Image: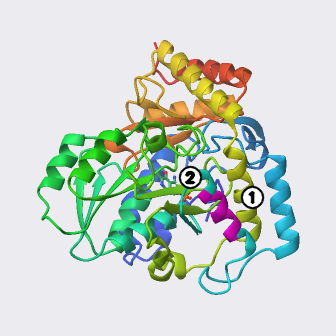
């Protein structure tokens, strides 16, 4: 058996070496698809290893200094000196882990402090920290809507939202991505007087487009539905206090939006998830929500870094300005070169470059990596309407020189891959 070429590669003879038929057989098409990709001579886009990380925007990949344009480190908080100091202090005082559930032994001082920081950040009555954003969606969505009730969600919703629906017992209704009319129509067909939850996202992470939240919330309220907005990709830089797209368009928690879901893995710069709400009965979720109860809580060092980062994000106005400048400069530069982008204007910190097919996407992705730039390659089923794209996510800490270098690399890779003339 040949040694795998990269950290998580399957051995080349995996299919031949395995029994003719067993539970793994259904994955043969997936194994064959990946092998065909690797046989075309490209590096595996889903097996990248960061050998060293030098800053929020630079890492070493395969021995090469690389600019990071494919992380969710929007506000560049991962190397903030205060954030790191808070994590080290908590590690010294409280040890490396909690060894248990939030409900039993796993709530330490800094879990409560992170929830207090979230309440301040959102001006919210209640905040509940989960071990990831994935689990926050899984937990709240599966618990809040039960058998005989309805969840109405955007067709392009994140996997964690779909999985929350799958874990619960509510009826699921999908509406066309960002279509206010379709949402209205589908809500109109549901019975009166039964519980309904409309699930939306502020920023949709594949194309970087934002939702028409004002209109959608108006329609949801007209039909008597509660509203949950996942603001994972907007925290820190949308709205006056950085609360998200809902704040940016003038909506309020409690009055218009019932639940905001978020994550610590993007702007906050660590790991964890949360839900904030003003509902007077919200705390009952801690007694009913299985993905909160039946898993270990976050290590104290993680929640301590989160609390410090969240409080700093409340006043990170310079970073916010720089992030939006970077988004506009990159969007304009790529548009001027002739790339097709996910949005006509820069709507968020995500800029998606749309490519013809997998081959073109992979060739271009590899050319960028070899030039010293890491972006995300995204493909169906993660992407909507079967598109292949290179997703760029900007950081407040990308310097103007880095943005210029990024544009130069895109021009060269675009020509090499035959995307640009
Ligand atoms: N919601 C959305 C919209 C996301 O994009 C993601 C992660 N990419 C999550 C939730 C899950 O967050 P986490 O990484 O904290 O699990």
Q: In this view, does 12 lie above or below 321?
A: below
Residue 247 position, x and y percent, is: 48, 42
Residue 421 in sight from this viewpoint: yes
Q: Which residue does the numbered mark 1 point to in the structure image? A: 305
Q: Which of 231 and 167 is in front in this view?
A: 231
Q: Estimate how packed mark 2 is, as few (under 14), some (14 to 19) or many (20 or more) residues with alpha carbons within 10 Å.
A: many
Is label 1 within 8 A of ligand 1 (CB to nearest ligand atom)? Answer: no
Could you tell me which quadrant the N terminus lies in? Answer: bottom right
Magenta: main secondary structure equals helix
Is 119 left, or right, of 28 in this rendering?
right
Q: Which residue does the numbered mark 2 point to in the structure image? A: 122
Label 1 and label 2: CA atoms lie apart by 18 Å
Earlier-in-chain disc, 1 versus 2? 2
Identify which residue is drawn at 22% across, 48% down. 183
Is 157 left, or right, of 79 in this rendering?
left
Residue 396 in sight from this viewpoint: no
Identify which residue is drawn at 79% across, 48% down. 52
Write down the quadrant of residue 397 in the picture. Answer: top right
Is label 2 within 8 A of ligand 1 (CB to nearest ligand atom)? Answer: no
Bounds of the magenta segment:
111-119
Q: What element carries label 1?
A: helix
Numbered-mark total: 2
Residue 70 position, x and y percent, is: 60, 40
């Amino acid at each position: 058996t040949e040694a795998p070429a990269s950290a998580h590669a399957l051995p080349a003879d995996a299919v031949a070496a395995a029994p003719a038929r067993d539970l793994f057989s259904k994955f043969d098409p997936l194994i064959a698809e990946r092998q065909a990709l690797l046989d075309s001579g490209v590096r595996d886009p889903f097996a990248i290893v960061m050998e060293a990380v030098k800053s929020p925007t630079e890492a070493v990949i395969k021995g090469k200094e690389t600019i990071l344009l494919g992380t969710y480190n929007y506000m560049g908080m991962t190397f903030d000196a205060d954030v790191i100091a808070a994590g080290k202090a908590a590690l010294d005082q409280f040890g490396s882990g909690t060894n248990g559930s939030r409900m039993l032994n796993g709530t330490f001082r800094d879990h409560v402090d992170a929830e207090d920081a979230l309440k301040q950040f959102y001006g919210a009555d209640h905040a509940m920290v989960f071990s990831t954003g994935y689990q926050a969606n899984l937990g709240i969505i599966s618990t809040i809507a039960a058998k005989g009730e309805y969840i109405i969600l955007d067709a392009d919703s994140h996997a964690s939202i779909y999985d929350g629906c799958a874990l619960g017992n509510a009826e699921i209704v999908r509406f066309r991505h960002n279509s206010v009319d379709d949402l209205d129509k589908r809500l109109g067909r549901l019975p009166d007087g039964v519980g309904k939850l409309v699930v939306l996202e502020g920023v949709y992470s594949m194309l970087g487009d934002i939702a028409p939240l004002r209109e959608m919330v108006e329609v949801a309220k007209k039909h008597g539905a509660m509203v949950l907005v996942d603001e994972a990709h907007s925290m820190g830089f949308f709205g006056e206090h950085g609360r998200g797209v809902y704040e940016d368009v003038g909506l309020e928690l409690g009055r218009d939006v019932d639940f905001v879901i978020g994550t610590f893995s993007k702007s906050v710069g660590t790991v964890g998830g949360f839900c904030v709400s003003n509902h007077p009965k919200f705390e009952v979720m801690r007694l009913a929500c299985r993905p909160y109860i039946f898993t270990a809580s976050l290590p104290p060092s993680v929640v301590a870094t989160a609390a410090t980062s969240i409080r700093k994000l409340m006043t990170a106005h310079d970073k916010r300005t720089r992030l939006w400048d970077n988004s506009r400069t990159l969007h304009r530069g790529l548009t001027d070169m002739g790339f097709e982008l996910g949005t006509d204007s820069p709507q968020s910190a995500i800029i998606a470059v749309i490519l013809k097919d997998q081959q073109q996407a992979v060739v271009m992705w590899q050319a960028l990596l070899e030039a010293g730039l890491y972006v995300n390659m995204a493909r169906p089923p993660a992407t909507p309407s079967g598109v292949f794209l290179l997703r760029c996510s900007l950081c407040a800490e990308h310097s103007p020189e880095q943005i210029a270098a990024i544009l130069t690399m895109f021009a060269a890779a675009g020509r090499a891959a035959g995307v640009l003339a």
